[in-house]
Image (cartoon, grey):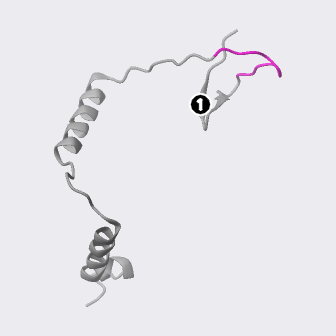
Amino acid sequence: MIAKGTVKGNIVVLDEGESLPDGARVEIGVIEMKLPLEEQRKREEIFNRILSHQINRYVGMNELLREERQELEERYDRWMGINEDSAS
């Protein structure tokens, strides 16, 4: 007997219509899903872009907060929900 499902939070959730008897001993195997070649290329391109833009220095929480505060001050219209067309 074979039943298929998906792992969610380390628990196997069986596909709709699948069932196993309570107390059944099971053996779980992973089915490797092959992506289409185009999707593989897209993911590889994205991964390479991420690697080429690495931050090679320590970034502290204070610096992140300072940048966020500066962005909020410069772009108050975004966080206040002001539409530039309706402001005039």
Most foreground residue, 82 or 44 = 44
Question: How many labels sit on residues?
Answer: 1
Residue type for callout 1: Val
Q: Residue at x 27, y 72 (%)?
A: 67
Corner quadrant of residue 57: bottom left
Where does the C terminus fall, quadrant-wise? bottom left
Image position, residue 85 (x, y; %): 26, 82
Residue found at the very far bottom of the displayed protein: 88
Inspect the magenta stretch and tell me whether residue 64 lies in it: no
Q: Is disc 1 surrounded by few (<14), some (14 to 19) or many (20+) residues within 10 Å?
A: few
Image position, residue 51 (x, y; %): 21, 41
Most foreground residue, 13 or 59 = 59
Most foreground residue, 22 or 17 = 22
Q: Give the answer, above or below, for where 36 lies relative to 1.
A: below
Corner quadrant of residue 16: top right
Q: Give the answer, above or below, for where 58 lies relative to 40.
A: below
Q: Give the answer, above or below, for where 40 lies relative to 75.
A: above
Residue found at the very far left of the displayed protein: 52
Image position, residue 81 (x, y; %): 38, 79
Residue found at the very far right of the displayed protein: 22
Corner quadrant of residue 62: bottom left
Most foreground residue, 87 or 39 = 39
User: What's drawn in magenta, residue-wise?
Assistant: 18-27
| SS label for mark 1 | strand
Q: Residue at x 75, y 22 (%)?
A: 19
48 lies left or right of 32: left
Q: Is the magenta region chiefly helix, strand or loop?
A: loop
Q: What residue did someone put label 1 on?
A: 7
Q: Residue at x 66, y 12 (%)?
A: 2
